[in-house]
Image: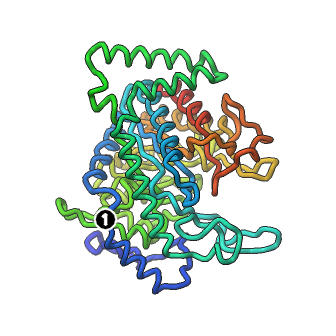
Amino acid sequence: MTTLSPLTWNPGSWRRFEAKQQPTWPDPAELERVEKELSAVPPLVFAGEARALRERLAEVAAGKAFLLQAGDCAESFDGFAADAIRDKLRVVLQMAVVLTYSAGVPTVKVGRIAGQFAKPRSSPTETIDGTELPSFLGHMVNDIAFSPGDRIPDPNRLLQAYNQSASTLNLLRAFTKGGFADLRQVQAWNQEFVAASPAGQRYADLGNEIDRALKFMEAAGISSNHPEINEADFYTSHEALILQYEEALTRQDSLTGKWYDCSAHMVWVGERTRQLSGAHVEFFRGINNPIGCKIGPTATPDDVVGLCDALDPQREAGRLTLIVRLGADNVEAGLPPLLEAVRDSGHPVVWACDPMHGNTYTSKSGRKTRHLDSIMAEVSGFFAAHRAAGTWPGGIHVELTGDDVTECVGGTFEVADADLPTRYETMCDPRLNAGQSLDLAFRLAELLR
């Protein structure tokens, strides 16, 4: 095992460690050329924005805010459109209004967007009709089409990922600061959902309460002229999987002298790449962004405390978010020992629940799917474990889209197994559609209250 002291860290020190889930780039010289080009482009986000998110997440860690991290499983080069970005943002804003009112604390909105182009895979190859090819690793690396040429990793895709992320960020900033996020408009969308929902009265009471609260605020003089009403703070995040891309976009802040990965406000290390002696943990420990770490069912209390020690040695609130993905059947037994160990270690982490990845199964039609009831069961178990430990269930981390897809089953607008082929459009994992996402928000509101 290679061990480096914090004083020897630099953006490329991860190269001395084993890097899991990395492509085999066929042309090292072309990769180096792309890395140099990326290292010279403007940053996608700024260090000050990342610091602002850390401050917001420190409030989550203290139980004074709630984290909603949501967006695509894997962004697509093919499906890039302003309407799709707008509709995804709209769902997140709608969910946030419901959660803010129910929790009585601000909701910190972080998207899986503007950079979520790479995916870890359980196998390096896949076989269809007897033909074995390299796995699809996300549009940042290769193409989903099943042919030998499409599956060759192409470093020029890193440049395309950067350019699309820049365009997406421009749209997000325009939408969130240009009136699209107005609270009254967002609540009007929620009321449309409630009126159409088969859940009917179950959601109507909460919707009416939010309406009355907004009318009271307006009567008290808090009108649409206030930024708190017509604007929203929205941050970006992705799994920082392809380390050459992340290193190339890491910049030294001119104000503080600290290093920030300027590909996103927040980045996380995945369940398959969180080895303490691995390249990803080495890279993450040196950047000053707020960072996340996925925690699956194989993680022990010692594993998790070890990760906290490596990634948050100064015990800084807002620095580290632990995103647990244990599965509905494992969360109530598996989470308490982790909560107790981290609590007793003194690390002020944000605890977030990823109720998606531990509840994936193959449907009768042969497609990967998730049932909304299982997703909600894991969220309920997550809350129960925190109540027992006396800790704050800080947030949720979900894969969703604003499109009317049929990828997950269940919901009040019932998607059955037989419906899955209708609009199964994901490139990798199944996502909640807009209606299912709002179902989740209203059900989660009942837990928060």
In the rendered view of the protein, which quadrant contains the N terminus? bottom left
Residue 79 location (% of width, % of height): 57, 55
Is residue 37 placed above or below 170 in the rendered structure?
below
Residue 305 location (% of width, % of height): 42, 55
Picture residue at 50% right of the left edge, 18% below the top? 206
Picture residue at 55% right of the left edge, 17% below the top? 204
Residue 303 vs residue 193, the one in the foreground: 193
Is residue 280 placed above or below 113 in the rendered structure?
below
From the viewer's perspective, tell me whether residue 383 is left or right of residue 228: right
- According to the picture, the residue beneath numbered tag 1 turns out to be 42
Residue 241 vs residue 139, the one in the foreground: 139
Residue 233 vs residue 305, the one in the foreground: 233
Label 1 crowd (10 A; few <14 / some 14-19 / many >=20)? few
| Residue 277 in view here | no
Picture residue at 47% right of the left edge, 64% below the top? 161
Residue 293 location (% of width, % of height): 46, 55
- SS at badge 1: loop
Residue 340 vs residue 347, the one in the foreground: 347
From the viewer's perspective, tell me whether residue 181 is left or right of residue 28: left
Residue 355 location (% of width, % of height): 58, 43
Is residue 379 placed above or below 7 in the rendered structure?
above
From the viewer's perspective, tell me whether residue 195 is left or right of residue 128: left
How many discs appear? Answer: 1
Dot 1 amino acid type: Pro
